[in-house]
Amino acid sequence: MRILHCTLDYAPCAVGGAEHQAQLQAEELNRRGHDVHVVCPRQGRENSGRVGGVSVHRLWRINHRPAQTLTACASLAWFLLCHAREFDIVHVHLADLRADVAALVCRLVRRPVYVKIAAGGPHGDIGKLRRISLLTRYYGLHHAACVQAISAEIQAQLAGLGVDPRRIAPIPNGFDPAVFQPASDSERKVIRRTLGLPEDRSIVLYVGRFARYKGLDDLLAVWPGIAERSGAECVLVGFVAYEDPYQIPRGIKGLTVRDWTSRPESLYRAADVFVQPSHVEGMSNALLEAMACGLPAVATRVGAAPQMVKDGVDGFLVPPGDAGALANAIERLLADPNLRRSVGGMARDSSHGRYKLSAVVDQIEAWYAAIAPR
């Protein structure tokens, strides 16, 4: 098939979870013999070209509000009007106004649209669309040939909108099992030395956007006490989000801040505990990858986390916004190496058993085949 993926950004730029999944899926589909293209806004000076065997088309837009979204949608509409007929499937990796634009244009040119919802809850994709729903009537969701729901929360939201359940694909995110594997104790020491991380204390790791909705305020409010009692180091790895930015406070004891990396697997393999304190999520790539590396995780009960984590078995779940519960779960793991090994081993087994990229793309490919023009 000829497949077009529409994203907010694409490698090698700093990208979020939805864009990371778009890259993983595009490259896997390309390996399977499909002709995969990606269209996204141009963020800076990067040019169109091939990335990992995938053709990337970077479109003009004004990178300043309030014209940013409107110019991105106009460029996407023009690109689709000119080129959508060349593709069998148009796959939109975020259910925002661009999904409405893609569904409208592709309906005109008779091409099926596959929409993936990146995040659920009141502040997720559908919640944000509510602000313009009187105008759009959720056009993209109602006219897409398939809507991918990566969590039960998103499925319930789609049902509440009246989306035909026969068009909802409950497909999770995936990871590459060749990349994300646990480290032995000796390997962990070498990795820490290479990364310049402390070798004499436990490390609690966060990987992701620095945004308020990620719950970093909750984590950092309790971290000085955790550090004092346990001697552990908290390592935050990420970048300041464009929307809802959160600036990491300075001078917090036992805190290390690192820039974003597109290759976080060494960080997971170097750490002792992973933490995801988010208030809003879809299906966290970082949580999935950490579990695949055998890292015991403390996550908030949002998005797909309750489906990914069996509380007390392969991780721990806490209510979003409950800093006390977050601290208790982290300290429980820090205090008990045997518990960390047990929970981490179960996390590795459960993630590798359910979320391998090949199995996820098998499901996506089957939906493509079902909705593609005959």
Image: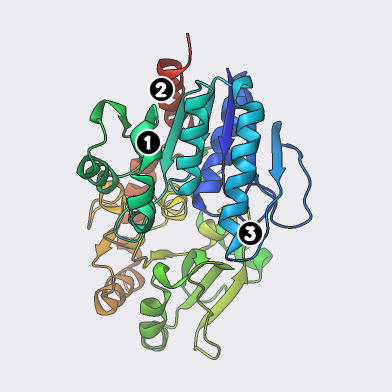
- The circle on residue 25 is none
Is residue 282 visible in the rendered structure shown here? Answer: no
* Quarter of the image where one finds residue 78: top right
Q: Nearer the viewer, residue 93 or 151?
A: 93
Q: Residue at x 36, y 56 (%)?
A: 124
Q: Secondary structure at mark 2?
A: helix
Which residue type carries mark 2? Answer: Trp
Q: Which residue is mark 3?
A: 261
- The circle on residue 367 is 2
Q: Name which of mark 2 and mark 1 comes first in the sequence.
A: 1
Task: From the viewer's perspective, tell me whether residue 131 is left or right of residue 247.
Answer: left
Q: Are marks 2 and 1 in contact (CB under 8 Å)?
A: yes
Which residue type carries mark 1? Answer: Gln
Q: How far is mark 1 from mark 3, CA to CA? A: 27 Å
Q: How far is mark 2 from mark 1, CA to CA? A: 10 Å
Is residue 122 visible in the rendered structure shown here? Answer: yes
Q: Nearer the viewer, residue 92 or 365?
A: 92
Disc 2 vs disc 3: which is toward the camera? 2
